[in-house]
Amino acid sequence: MKTYEEINKKIEAKKAVVLTADEIIDYVDKKGLDAVAEEVDVVTTATFGAMCSSGCFLNFGHSKPKIKMTEAWIEDVLAYTGIAAVDVYLGATQLRHNDPANMYYPGDFQYGGGHVIEQLIAGKQLQLFTLSYGTDDYPLRELRTYFTINDLNQAIMVNPRNCYQNYNVAINCSEKPIYTYLGLLKPNMKNLTYSSAGQLSPLLNDPFYETIGVGTRVWLAGAQGHVYAEGTQHCSSAQRGDNGVPVEGAGTLALTGNMKEMNPKYVRGVSLKGYGVSLALGVGIPIPILNKDILKRTTIKDSDIYAPIIDYSRDYPQRSPNIICRMSYEELRRGEVTINNKLVEVSSMSSYAIALEIAEILKDDIKQGKFLVSKPLTTLPPNQGFHPLQTRNKT
């Protein structure tokens, strides 16, 4: 048994033994659980992919004369202003003003909130246009200016839902192509897409939320952020396999971090034809090896993690419980799978290579004493379900 305090003392002394979730699998096979549990202090996990439920709070400071922003656009992308006078919230999936969306199907969705966030972190100069109804203490009614992230008092990424513990695999059983948040799905089951780092993914390495909880320090696109709450749609009561790993969408994390400390390489605006815009984001989370059981769970392999294959032409939009089958990430990563005697092309919406790069960066940061592990302030809800929206008449 180890404690967080003991592990952090080793990190501060630059004596911690740290491996990535990719490395730990073979290491335990070679040396055994008992020996490795004594030797290894931290296992690093990571993921990189589209995380639509992301965004940021920005504070502009006060102009002269002052303005109470009631409508605001950054590079013509609408920001939410229903807070204090010069605070706004920009969502990753917000479209640019006058984007035709799917008026001419399928739309291109060339630019939106995710792209603004990418450019902001990259230090680009952006346009702010804002309107107000005017008040005695905030008399200005209109303002147009240009700014960079360095002009902002605060630029705080605040993401309600990141790092899905597991997720659907999308396929199209209809006779026409469809456009989804998991990309283009060709007709008649010609391709399928998934989005997960599998054996590297944070919550798949901590399936029962033993070390990842509210207050956990995370690597968020290069900044040291933290988990501030359970993520929206957190569903820990999801169906699980014999190894305890969910076989469908389950836990999620709400994350926050300082955008001024982020690396633009790991924050990328995404355009999804026929669907919308999003933000691809890199996240790394260390798992302190407090005991042998926690270590064992970090040795999960792609061959042990199964995801449901769902028809996105009918079952997904109609909220049907049907699944075609389940497949392991080991099978999916081969690039081709066989379903109903049909060879199906496979592609991923997340990057295992970049996730592995992040896990290595986090490993180095910990070994150099730059990144400590943190004990959660409280655990994530362990047995929470998910309630769909019901359409009702007024009673």
Image (spheres, rainbow, N blue to C red):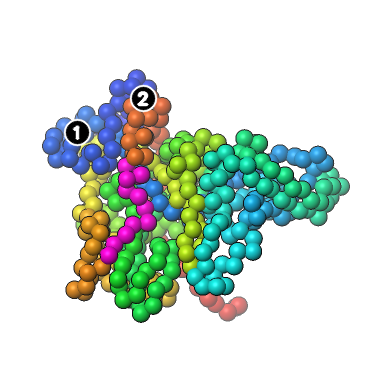
Task: Please state which of residues 96 and 213 is positioned toward the viewer in this rendering.
Answer: 96
Q: Which residue is mark 2?
A: 368
Q: In the visual, does 34 lie left or right of 360?
A: left
Stretch of the chain drawn in magenta: 345-356
From this viewpoint, is residue 238 visible?
no
**Visible residue check, residue 85:** yes
Residue located at (23% from left, 38% from top): 23
Residue type pointed to by label 2: Gln
Q: Which dot, 1 or 2, sits closer to the camera?
A: 2
Looking at the rendered image, the quarter that the N terminus falls into is top left
Q: Residue reaching furthest right? A: 136
Residue 75's spot in the image, x, y percent? 64, 51
The kind of secondary structure element at disc 1 is: helix
Q: Is residue 354 magenta?
A: yes
Q: Secondary structure at mark 2?
A: loop
Query: Where's residue 148, x and y in %?
Result: 63, 39
- x, y percent for residue 370: 41, 27
Residue at 22% x, 73% y: name it: 342
Count neighbours of disc 2 (C-alpha within 10 A) and say few if under 14, some if 14 to 19, many if 20 or more. some
Q: Indicate whether 326 appears above or below 58.
A: below
Circle 1: is it few (<14), some (14-19), or many (20+) Cα within 10 Å? many
Q: Which mark is residue 36?
A: 1
The residue under label 1 is which amino acid type? Val
- Of the pair 11 and 359, the residue shown nearer to us: 359
